[in-house]
């Protein structure tokens, strides 16, 4: 897998979210991972982790 480095105009928070987005889309393209087993970017970055536990 080739991961691109974000450009200089992207914030650190957005760079992290972009990396998570690319990870999730890569996992979703694999039939081994079901959508119900995956997490969303919102679930990952929210303060309450109760919804994140799958």
Image (cartoon, rainbow, N blue to C red):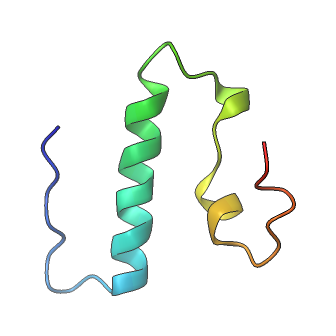
Quick one: quadrant of the N terminus?
Answer: top left
Quick one: quadrant of the C terminus?
Answer: top right
Residue 2 x %, y %:
12, 44
The number of numbered badges drawn on the structure is 0
Instruction: Using the image, determine if residue 8 lies above or below residue 19.
Output: below
Instruction: Using the image, determine if residue 14 lies above or below residue 39.
Output: below
Task: List the single residue furthest toward the front.
Answer: 53
Residue at image coords 64%, 63%: 44
Residue 21 x %, y %:
43, 52
Q: Is residue 29 left or right of residue 33?
A: left
Residue 49 x %, y %:
79, 66
Residue at image coords 14%, 76%: 7
Q: Is residue 51 left or right of residue 19?
A: right
Residue at image coords 49%, 28%: 28
Q: Is residue 45 left or right of residue 10?
A: right
Residue 47 x %, y %:
76, 79
Task: List the single residue furthest toward the right.
Answer: 50
Residue at image coords 41%, 23%: 29
Instruction: Using the image, determine if residue 5 lies above or below residue 36.
Output: below
């Amino acid at each position: 897998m080739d991961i691109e480095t974000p450009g200089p105009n992207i914030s650190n928070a957005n760079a992290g979210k972009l990396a998570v987005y690319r990870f999730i889309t890569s996992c979703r393209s694999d039939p081994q991972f079901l959508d119900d087993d995956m997490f969303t970017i919102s679930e990952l970055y929210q303060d309450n982790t109760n919804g994140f536990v799958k």
